[in-house]
Amino acid sequence: MTSLTARIAALLDGRTDRPRRIAVVGAGVLGLTTAWALARRGHAVTVLDAGPIPNPEGSSFDEGRIIRHAYGTMEGYAAMMPAAFTAWRALFAETGADRLVPARAIYALREETPWQGAVARSQARHGLGFTAVDPATIPVLNPDGVIRAMEVAGSGMLLAAPILADLVALLPSLGVVLRPCSVVAACPEGGPVLADGTRIPADATLVAAGAGVLRLMPEAARRFGLRASLQTVAYLEPPPGLWEDAPMLLCRLPGHPTGGVYVLPPRAGTRLKIGDYDTSATVSPDAPRDPPRAGRVAALLHAGARAIAGFGAHRVMGARHCLYTMAPEDRFVLQPVAAGVTLASACSGHGFKLAPLMALGLAAGVEGQVTAEHLAFWASGREGEASAATASA
Ligand SMILES: Cc1cc2nc3c(=O)[nH]c(=O)nc-3n(C[C@H](O)[C@H](O)[C@H](O)COP(=O)(O)OP(=O)(O)OC[C@H]3O[C@@H](n4cnc5c(N)ncnc54)[C@H](O)[C@@H]3O)c2cc1C
């Protein structure tokens, strides 16, 4: 574990001797886990959300999210993953429900990239397996064009909606106030301002508003290169029995307009889900998401058929669009934007798995245990990258 990550993870233990009033804007996974990290250390936290809490329109709301150690060439984030798993376990111990379902993860590689060497290094560093698997042993995988199938140990699915529900149930017992209301100004000194003009008194404000930050703080969003993209997912009913012990599949499809698909098997009450890697469409956070765009859904299903064996025997139960907040190079943005105000953007495809660890980072920032500059650097995954490069040199 890298030094800053270790220092930040240490905030799981103990309480502050200088409790502060914190306003958290946004009750997605980042806002709610941040409230958890702060409240259990003794801070007085108010969470504000423009929608219901939890908000089914937020990026965090879905049946399942992937968690894994493999991070490709972003080895700094791979270095954070053991601490991220530890933070999830600490949260589940307090909610009383373990929402991490272990699941095999198979990467079906159709071209040679630097990804494989980087994952081999980071898995070895964590003592985790990274094993070639005969594609023929995975009945759900379409082997056409697959040059190698690699199993990445230490992977699983986070049951996203139940996690949000557990947090909403837990937080009031830690003294957290959950308040459905829209914030119209996050940066005034003394605390954020609501649509009805009320000010929420706060010593510090943490803005975890997902794509809503583009509306709330357009200048800061521009400065840090944030944008919203529309992601398409579909839920499938598989032929009976086929997916019972099947792994998650991660299938890049070189040359395909979607970039490829990831597949979450049905587990613990979730449906079989496919999603694609097409992040090319930049949209307004208010863009209508219903009905799903037929062209995007067709492209996703076409990619699904390239990745999944016997795809035609699966029934499409539904499809939807969700908002991704994209940041340059897919790196988290935890940046000061005004006195006492920090923008926290859980970016792109990895915002869920790292949320409780990022939440501890935000707590470390609030308590002055790390400087704003160090926090931003750490959240960008560059600290671990530097040590990973040293370790592999
Ligand atoms: C389809 C899809 C698949 C994904 N897959 C994975 C995965 O497998 N693994 C992984 O780790 N991550 C994954 N992610 C990414 C991850 O889900 C997100 O990064 C994460 O959920 C973002 O959380 P958040 O709390 O920052 O934002 P959100 O969940 O969007 O929460 C932001 C909240 O802020 C509120 N808000 C906005 N504006 C205001 C305002 N002015 N006042 C008050 N409240 C406001 C909104 O109502 C919303 O509830 C995926 C994302 C999507 C969309």
Image: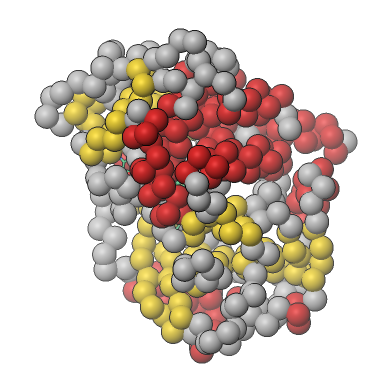
Residue at point 54% right, 29% down?
A: 360
Reply above or below: 4 against 71.
above
Residue 48 x, y percent position in the rendering: 28, 34
Residue 386 x, y percent position in the rendering: 74, 30
Q: What coloring was used for the rendering? A: secondary structure
Reply above or below: 44 against 310.
above
Q: Determine the residue located farthest toward the right in the rendered image.
A: 393
Q: 69 and 275: which one is in front?
A: 69
Q: 115 and 38: which one is in front?
A: 38
Q: Determine the residue located farthest toward the top in the rendered image.
A: 18
**Picture quarter with the C terminus:** top right
Residue at point 60% right, 77% down?
A: 244
Q: 353 and 383: which one is in front?
A: 353
All told, the count of numbered labels is 0
Dividing the picture into quadrants, the one containing residue 155 is bottom right
Residue 139 x, y percent position in the rendering: 68, 82
Q: Locate residue 216 relative to residue 12 in the image: left or right.
A: left
Q: 11 and 55: which one is in front?
A: 11
Dividing the picture into quadrants, the one containing residue 201 is top left
Residue at point 55% right, 42% down?
A: 93
Residue 349 seen in this snapshot: no
**Picture quarter with the N terminus:** top right
Residue 384 x, y percent position in the rendering: 70, 33
Q: Locate residue 183 relative to residue 108 in the image: left or right.
A: left
Q: Locate residue 52 relative to residue 326 in the image: left or right.
A: left
